[in-house]
Structure formats: C-alpha cells, structure tokens
Image (cartoon, helix red, strand yellow):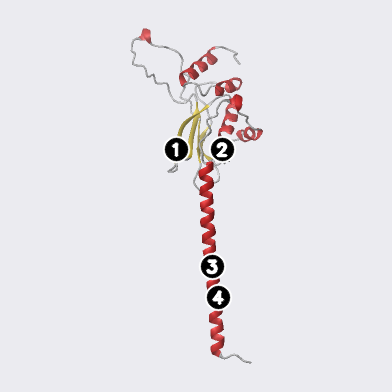
Amino acid sequence: MMMSQDDVNNESHNEFNNLKEESSENEADEVANQEASENLFLLVTSVTRKEISKRRPLETLSIPDAAFEQAVNLYVELQFEHWDYVNLVLLAYGQKEGFAWRIQDKKLDKNSRVYKYVFECRHARNFQSKKKTTELSQQCNRKSVKTNCTCYINICWLLKVLGPSITKLNLIHYGHELCPNNAHFINVYQLLPQNIIDKVGFYIDAIPNIS
C-alpha cells in the first residue's frame, strides 16, 4: 500500500520530533552529569584541601622513599597529591640538601581551606630586634640565624585541579652553609619557640664538626 505525501510528511515530522526530544534528553543528561561531577569534585576538594597537619616532629614522621625520589627534582608545575605530601617532599628535600623550611605564608579560600603555601628557608629575611634597648653594653651581639637567604617555593592548589602544584621557586641559598648532617636535628625542633631555634642554630654554626 502506497503512502500519501501527507503520510510521508507526517512520518518525517514525527521522526524529527523524536530525534529532537532524544537530543534534548541527552543534553539534559550531560548537564546533570557535569553538575554532579563538579559537585563531587568540590566535595572532594573541600575534604582534601586541609592544611598541613600539625604533627611536625620527625622522630614520629616516616618519610616514604617516593617523597625522597620526588624531592630530587623540584620544578614549576610539579603536582602533588595533597598538602601533607607536599610537607613530606619538602622535608625530604631539606634533609637531602641540609637546611630547614618554614611556612612564610598561607592563603585561605572562602571555605577556610588552604589554597596556597609559601615556604622559605629558615635563614630567609633579615634579623630585626624587637628590643627597645639602645645602650650598647646591654645589647646582645649574638649572630642571627637570618641571613636574607633567597630560597623559597610557592605552591598553589587551584579550585578545579586534583592537587597542589609548584608555581614559583628559587632553590638558590644565600649567606649560610648547607649542613645535611644537621637537617634532621633542626627539623625535629620546629615546634620550639623561634628564639630557642635560633640559639640551637647559633651553637650548631659556632661549634666545628658538630653532628
């Protein structure tokens, strides 16, 4: 039985409408999947974007071999799993080279999650006395641990990236010696007040062949 021209037109129109509906449904599914994926990513990011854990003493901290391997070559755009792993890699690098890092600054997002850390050598910046004493006989001439060292590293965790990565770095040291044998000792005492750490560093530098 032959179809009339009207029947052919109606069938073509119905097929077009069906394809249009399927296309709309597919687009809606894609949008829903994308939104779900973004929501899941934001949820994961909010959970894992926590700041570096406070457990700093190295006698209770095991640095994996993978962290030492990654510490061999630090470069811009190098990506890490999370902030605690950043800490492990930098501690490994400090032990290998013979110095200690300190956190110079950190930036928080609107959810109070850390998206940026600035690490610098503990010898960075110049010493500025907080004492008001001007009498020379009452001033302490102890050598400061700060030598205006230029070594630093910036690490950022952008919102839609799975982990933090290096954005800037300068690994050249200035004004002090690197002492691999003393790096572990220095890092163990990072929880002490800065003036105590400075005194420890002073005696390490003053006594030859100390290990």
Quadrant assignment for the C terminus: top right
Q: Crowding near pointer 1: few (<14 within 10 Å), some, many (20+)?
A: few
Q: Amino acid at mark 4?
A: Asn
Residue placed under numbered mark 1 in the picture: 107
Identify the residue at the far top of this view.
137
From the top left corner, tell me how far across and down residue 23 is, in percent.
54, 69
From the top left corner, tell me how far across and down residue 206 is, in percent.
53, 12
Q: Crowding near pointer 4: few (<14 within 10 Å), some, many (20+)?
A: few
From the top left corner, tell me how far across and down residue 36 is, in percent.
53, 55
Closer to the eye: label 2 or 1: 1
Residue placed under numbered mark 4 in the picture: 18
Q: Amino acid at mark 3?
A: Glu
Q: Does the CB distance between marks 2 and 1 fall below 8 Å?
A: no
Task: Work out how far the residue at label 4 is from the one at label 3, CA to CA, in angstroms.
Answer: 11 Å
Disc nearer the start of the sequence (4/3): 4
> Which of the 4 image quadrants contains residue 60?
top right
Q: Crowding near pointer 3: few (<14 within 10 Å), some, many (20+)?
A: few
Name the residue nearer the viewer: 17 or 175. Answer: 17
Disc nearer the start of the sequence (4/2): 4
Q: Amino acid at mark 2?
A: Tyr
Residue placed under numbered mark 2 in the picture: 75
Task: Work out how far the residue at label 4 is from the one at label 1, CA to CA, in angstroms.
Answer: 52 Å
Task: Work out how far the residue at label 3 is from the one at label 1, CA to CA, in angstroms.
Answer: 42 Å
Residue placed under numbered mark 3 in the picture: 25
Task: Work out how far the residue at label 4 is from the one at label 2, CA to CA, in angstroms.
Answer: 54 Å
Disc nearer the start of the sequence (3/1): 3
Task: Work out how far the residue at label 3 is from the one at label 2, CA to CA, in angstroms.
Answer: 45 Å
Task: Work out how far the residue at label 2 is from the one at label 1, CA to CA, in angstroms.
Answer: 21 Å
